[in-house]
Image (cartoon, rainbow, N blue to C red):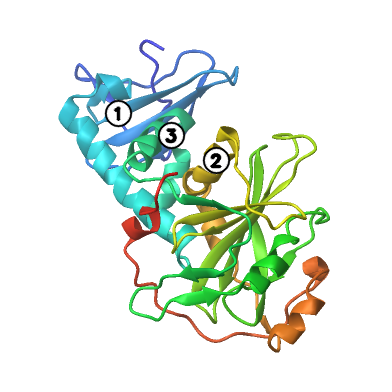
Amino acid sequence: MADAGIAAGEGFPDVIRDGRRITRTEEGWHLTGVVRCLRPLTVLSFRHEDGLHEACWFTGPDGELRATGFEQLPRQDQAELQESATALFVLLARDILISVYPSPPEDAWQLAALSPALRLKLLYHWLSTFPAPEIRTGLPAEGFRQPRPSQAEQVVSPERLRVLLAAPHGVAENEPLVVLSPFSDTLVSGAEVLDDGEMRLWRFADRRAGSVFFLGAVLPQYSPGSRFTLFYSPLASTVFLFRTGNDEPFEPDPDLVRIGQSVPGRLCIATAASPSLCNQPVPADKAVSGLAGMSLIGQVSRLKPDTAASGPLTDDLNLPAVFAGRQT
């Protein structure tokens, strides 16, 4: 893409090389994004009309072209670019994984305009610094304990987890997924945030308990004849895997472990590409009276909560704690 540049027009920044302003692109190349949030550089993303090729240019504060590829940047510029991106990734991850009332920062929306290859490069570098979540299989006889900063830990009984397990399977297209929160006597409605061919994941925000959790299904394409349910607690950095219809612990194969451990990373990747995942409205919740109400939840996927819950709760967790799980 030698001498490719930017067509003159509103919103297109000046790009200067060797003292001359570049005013045109090579045939077939189009500017797809201008990202100014990765200070001190501006990143220009290009895509070829064949849909197979992409490129990035990097300019300084004065518009001078610094490089036409990330690897061509000086080490210091690469480090500063990564530092700026990491600060935004941390905020997006906090929103998708922890915040009951997420609010992505304005700059984070620009990340979606990066070329996918560069966005993934920056993300993988950041995600590689965090350990994978702990993987557990089957229904724990002792239940499940979720830590919370500055508050008493939340305890989930085996009965609550058992009710939760059947929810991700057999859900009709475009139907909301509504479940009984394992952390309170509350029906919560989920928003689908991931469907990547290996798993489907729904995000649930329990406003009464101040907790976010994820429920999903490992898709049949991964293992024909075997279906798995997945429950992820970011606060505990733990992923539970269950055989559908079977509560017993089992020895997962390496591919299934890989899928389970990749859950937080996949969620962060999806959110960086589409920050609107964080902005899906938190539906109203509906209180259910004690465990006696749990028998009503077996076919709950078409229920629609209709009662407002309590007000906002403070998110006072440092993000690295979310990733402080143990790799098995």
The label nearer to you, 1 versus 2, is 2
The amino acid type, in three-letter code, at marker 1 is Phe
- Say which residue label 1 marks: 58
Q: Are marks 1 and 2 in contact (CB under 8 Å)?
A: no
Choose between 203 and 146: the one closer to the eye: 146
Relative side of 28 to 147, left or right? right
- Say which residue label 3 marks: 120
Who's the residue at 55% across and 87% down the image?
A: 310
Return the disc, 1 or 2, that comes first in the chain's sequence. Answer: 1
Who's the residue at 59% across and 21% down the image?
A: 51
The label nearer to you, 1 versus 3, is 3
Q: CA distance from mark 3 to mark 2?
A: 22 Å
Quick one: quadrant of the N terminus? top left
Quick one: quadrant of the C terminus? top left
Relative side of 270 to 130, left or right? right
Q: Give the residue furthest to the top.
A: 2
Kind of element beneath mark 3? helix
On the question of residue 123 being in view, the answer is yes
Q: Give the residue furthest to the left.
A: 76
Q: CA distance from mark 1 to mark 2?
A: 38 Å
Task: Mark 3: give few (<14), some (14-19) or many (20+) Cα within 10 Å.
Answer: some
The amino acid type, in three-letter code, at marker 3 is Leu
Return the disc, 3 or 2, that comes first in the chain's sequence. Answer: 3
Q: Are marks 1 and 3 in contact (CB under 8 Å)?
A: no
- Say which residue label 2 marks: 257
The amino acid type, in three-letter code, at marker 2 is Val
Return the disc, 1 or 3, that comes first in the chain's sequence. Answer: 1
